[in-house]
């Protein structure tokens, strides 16, 4: 069996390093412009350069998103941006707009181009079209079933790669091309400024009764009528292999390092276990399920892979995440037995936390002591992004993550 690529998102340099250490074969990131996650922290050019160097040192590729649907005013900036990327040399550019594609081919032809899901890639003639223009890979539309992807694979050149989302948030609009955000708030989703109106609670107002809000019910459970469950294919790795997908893509360029570490580690192990032995994959299924449910999620669905979703793919009563763990920080270094971290959420001396390791182990540990950068002892760490030295009852290594299980 051909080993598929595990492609993980990263919102920052810290998250990129986490993705690399926890099992990614490739990471996709956004710069400060021309990507579809404008609200994500994203990467400066220097951070991008550092991230690519870090990833390449581990044999991991880095792809940069430039997948807006461009307007005339964007084009000069796109040219300048690609000239900078030509020097930094990511492994590929992810592009949706044909005009942006042409600019990339002209300015940095040596960099691979991958066609974004935003380009609505639903049939093998579309794949052939992009291949003839020089694309290395096409990201399938999320509306495709596994049988359609398998048919695609049989009707496109062998050297044209198929990338497919296998985990993460689903967009209510076709291939992510949403007009709701622009209509309600003036912020264009196709320019990277989506306000996620699909997660809002809706009511109906009758014209002659302004101010009187009538609830919208699909049934008695609630009014979040556009609020899709999250995609999760961890239980269906054999079917993804069978479809001939070259790259298993995880959604989440606005997610935390804890989310990225959890999903990357789980899919990494599932893919490797299946390649080693289908029986081993089946045997370890309870572990995959438990791990994937330990990060934030909205309940799970298999999306369009086994046919068009029905009403059970929606969540009607809430738009909040299920959250079992709180992210405390990543071990940046270990000095004299103490973990150096940049704290993310409050924790205290005496608390029981977990050390999350890239190899799949989760080690329970007690917080023995906390000191700040000046060496002052602290009973708790209440200030986000404070640099701390933390002694634990168990051993941690650089790049391990610290997390705390929440009471349900």
Image (spheres, helix red, strand yellow):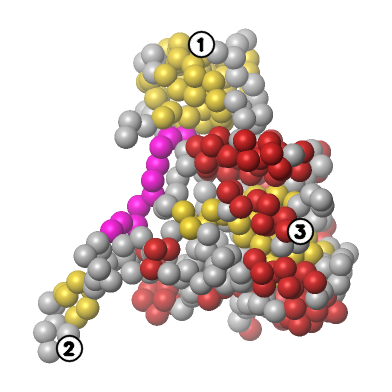
Residue bearing the label numbered 2: 207
Q: At 49% across and 16% down in the image, what residue appears?
A: 365
Of badges 3 and 1, the one in the foreground is 3
Q: Is residue 344 left or right of residue 382?
A: right
Tell me if label 2 and label 3 are in contact, CB under 8 Å.
no
Tell me if label 3 and label 1 are in contact, CB under 8 Å.
no
Residue bearing the label numbered 3: 246
Residue 325 drawn in magenta: yes
Q: At 59% across and 14% down in the image, what residue appears?
A: 395
Badge 3: how crowded within 10 Å, few (<14), some, or many (20+)? many
Indicate whether 13 appears above or below 298: above
Residue bearing the label numbered 1: 393
Q: Nearer the viewer, residue 112 or 333?
A: 112
Q: At 86% across and 72% down in the image, what residue appears?
A: 157
Q: Is residue 361 visible?
A: yes
Q: What is the spatial separation of the Cα atoms under label 3 and label 1, in whole angstroms? A: 42 Å
**Range drawn in magenta:** 317-327
Q: Residue furthest front?
A: 279
Residue 354 drawn in magenta: no
Q: In the structure shown, which secondary structural element does the residue marked by tag 3 occupy? A: loop
């Amino acid at each position: 069996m051909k080993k598929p690529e595990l492609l993980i998102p990263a919102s920052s340099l810290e998250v990129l390093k986490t993705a690399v250490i926890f099992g990614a074969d490739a990471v996709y990131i956004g710069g400060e412009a021309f990507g579809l996650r404008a609200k994500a922290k994203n990467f400066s050019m220097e951070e991008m350069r550092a991230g690519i160097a870090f990833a390449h040192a581990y044999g991991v590729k880095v792809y940069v998103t430039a997948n807006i649907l461009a307007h005339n005013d964007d084009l000069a900036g796109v040219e300048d941006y690609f000239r900078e990327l030509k020097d930094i040399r990511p492994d590929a550019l992810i592009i949706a707009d044909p005009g942006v594609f042409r600019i990339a081919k002209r300015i940095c032809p040596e960099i691979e181009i991958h066609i974004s899901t935003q380009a609505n890639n639903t049939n093998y003639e579309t794949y052939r079209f992009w291949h003839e223009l020089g694309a290395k890979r096409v990201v399938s539309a999320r509306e495709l079933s596994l049988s359609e992807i398998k048919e695609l694979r049989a009707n496109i050149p062998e050297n044209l790669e198929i990338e497919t989302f296998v985990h993460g948030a689903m967009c209510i609009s076709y291939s992510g091309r949403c007009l709701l955000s622009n209509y309600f708030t003036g912020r264009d989703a196709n320019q990277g400024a989506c306000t996620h109106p699909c997660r809002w609670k809706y009511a109906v107002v009758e014209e002659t009764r302004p101010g009187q809000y009538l609830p919208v019910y699909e049934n008695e459970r609630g009014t979040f009528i556009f609020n899709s469950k999250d995609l999760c294919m961890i239980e269906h790795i054999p079917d993804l292999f069978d479809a001939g997908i070259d790259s298993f893509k995880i959604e989440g360029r606005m997610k935390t390092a804890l989310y990225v570490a959890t999903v990357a580690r789980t899919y990494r192990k599932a893919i490797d276990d299946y390649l080693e032995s289908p029986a081993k994959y089946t045997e370890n299924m309870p572990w995959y399920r438990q791990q994937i449910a330990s990060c934030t999620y909205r309940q799970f669905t298999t999306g369009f892979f086994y046919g068009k979703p029905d009403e059970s793919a929606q969540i009607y009563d809430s738009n909040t995440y299920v959250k079992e763990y709180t992210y405390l920080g990543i071990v940046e270094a270990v000095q004299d037995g103490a973990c150096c971290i940049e704290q993310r959420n409050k924790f205290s001396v005496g608390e029981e936390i977990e050390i999350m390791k890239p190899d799949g182990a989760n080690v329970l540990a007690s917080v023995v002591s906390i000191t700040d950068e000046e060496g002052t002892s602290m009973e708790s760490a209440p200030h986000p992004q404070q640099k701390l030295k933390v002694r634990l009852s168990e051993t941690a290594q650089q790049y391990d993550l610290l997390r705390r299980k929440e009471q349900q």
